[in-house]
Amino acid sequence: MTPARPPVHLLWGQDAFLLREAAAELLGEVQPVEIDAAEWRGGETSDLATPSLFGDRRALVVTDAKSLPEAAITELRSYLDRPAPDSPLVLLAVVGERAKAPASLVKIVQPVGAVREVRVARKDLPGWVTRRAAARAVRLAPDAAPALVGAIGEDPAALDQALVQLSTAFPGERVTADLVGRQFRGLGDQHTWDLCDRAFRRDLPAAMRSLRTLTESRADPLMILGAIASRLRDLLRMRALPERMPPSEAARAAGLRFEWQARAYRDQARRFTLDELVEIHEHVVDADLLLKSAGADAAVVVLPMLIARIAGEPVAVGVA
């Protein structure tokens, strides 16, 4: 009989919300200690091998594991030589589009644990929404899931939050596409949200595709620029908040509607220094002046240049 593998998991993918949900499913009722890779101080694995005084199972979840320092990789490598058999260790690694799992983590986890990609393909989103709705006791008509994806976009966290809203707005009712449209009409074009998500995640190819979709649908350039400016202001507010502030408190402090926004925007803000965000704000002001003075025709040049400045990789100062 093959012995059971230790509960060590590397979950990787493009969406932080899906990774967290997969981790929660793995852990079940076990309450983990959660730490961001940037907060690793050393000794985090020692508690996993120490029995709890109250008999509770221990677990550790590491978010943004791709950013773990070399000292943490060394500690994890040592721990994984003899991992605790009943204490789950879950590493969550968010990667860019078409990127693979971090090789340094795969190398140490794969021999003793499980490495799994977590994703929902675009074509599978309506089915995913239907399953999430059932878990939240929301009755969806067959046309409602595609309508929700069309209204909210492809962000799983936003779709999940939309289901929560529907359950509150229409308790016990069968939600149709018409009700979806009634509930989310007036929230603005979700495609601009997708553009902002991809640009401020520094995913340049995906951001340019989103921009192309918007321009081909004749979206108002000033509306697109307004959405970018609004997201930038949210990120500046998130950047000013303490890193350890819980997402629920951060959402209130930053004036955001939902806790998931605080998580997502904090992740995006971390990708920029404060100086970079201030510089982007200056570019947004310049773009606004150009669009208003030169007209909508200037958008074919102004908006791609702005997106490239936001989503492009940062350039190291002083490097030839």
Image: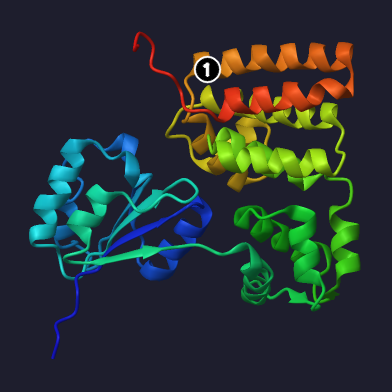
Going by the numbered disc 1, the residue's amino acid type is: Glu
| Residue closest to the eye, 250 or 92 | 92
The residue indicated by pointer 1 is 276
Number of numbered discs visible in the structure rendering: 1
Q: Is residue 115 above or below residue 229?
A: below
Q: Secondary structure at mark 1?
A: helix
- In this image, 133 relative to 58: left or right? right
Residue 39: percent from the left, percent from the top?
A: 31, 35
- In this image, 267 relative to 70: left or right? right
In percent of the image, x 66 and y 45: which residue is there?
258
Q: Residue furthest top?
A: 318
In percent of the image, x 85 and y 44: which residue is there?
217
- In this image, 129 relative to 200: left or right? right
- In this image, 118 relative to 304: left or right? left
In percent of the image, x 86 and y 68: which residue is there?
177
Residue 165: percent from the left, percent from the top?
A: 75, 59
The crowd level at tag 1 (other Cα within 10 Å; few <14, some 14-19, many 20+) is: some
